[in-house]
Image (spheres, rainbow, N blue to C red):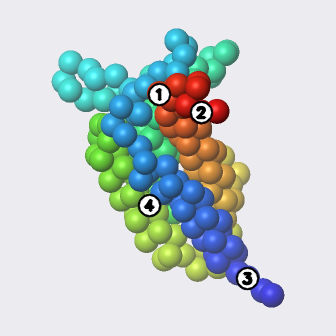
Amino acid sequence: MTTNRLGLLRGQFDLTWALFEYHLERLEEADFRWEPVAHCWTVREDAHGRWVPDWADTEPDPVPVPTIAWLTWHIGWWWETATSHVRGVPPRDRTEITWPGSGEPAVAWLRSLREEWLTAVSALSEPDLDTPAAFPDPAYTRAQMIAWVNAELMKNVAEIGQLRLLRVAGRVSPAASR
């Protein structure tokens, strides 16, 4: 069986997205900004009504636990940046990528980013995969970046799923869960 690299990468992406849809369909508005511990990164509304993510240019130790809101913003930031690199256009600065808000706005945003990504990647040919991408690593090719997107998305999907499950489990009495 021979599979081209684009087909393999697309198959990995489709599997990860199917797992994400399981959680996206079940997310409640209150899930997004739920903080499971005191040491969290989230998004906070500024004086102009814009959602601003917590951020540090140097990763703190210990790393804060992200909320679903922060994770969905983070996906939006790196995915929009990766899509720009696939298209060969300069990406927007991280501070210009605005989270749309909890619930349906965030879910719709992620689904639209998926469509933009699939459109950009579908325009590539096999030889395009060997051209430089420079994101998230200056030495990456487009193939490596696409594989990284698949891995980063899978990691973020697992984090969102785990947070959602923990929040739901916290609403169930111990006696009812036996």
SS label for mark 1: loop
Closest to the observer: 93 or 8? 8
Dot 2 amino acid type = Ser
Dot 1 amino acid type = Arg
Residue 64 seen in this snapshot: yes
The crowd level at tag 4 (other Cα within 10 Å; few <14, some 14-19, many 20+) is some
N-term-proximal mark, 2 vs 4? 4
Q: Which mark is residue 114?
A: 4
Contact, CB < 8 Å: mark 1 with mark 4?
A: no
Residue 93 at what x, y percent from top left? 41, 39
| Viewer-side label of 2, 4 | 2
Judged from this view, the residue extending furthest toward the top is 38
| Viewer-side label of 3, 1 | 1
| Label 3 sits on residue | 3
N-term-proximal mark, 1 vs 4? 4
The part of the image, by quadrant, that contains residue 57 is top right
Above or below, 132 against 75 in this view is below
**Mark 2 vs mark 4, CA separation in Å:** 36 Å
The part of the image, by quadrant, that contains residue 99 is top left
Contact, CB < 8 Å: mark 2 with mark 4?
A: no
SS label for mark 2: loop
| Viewer-side label of 1, 4 | 1
Residue that appears at 33% across and 37% down: 29
Residue that appears at 40% across and 65% down: 115
The crowd level at tag 3 (other Cα within 10 Å; few <14, some 14-19, many 20+) is few
N-term-proximal mark, 4 vs 3? 3
| Label 2 sits on residue | 177
N-term-proximal mark, 2 vs 3? 3
Residue 90 seen in this snapshot: no
Dot 4 amino acid type = Arg
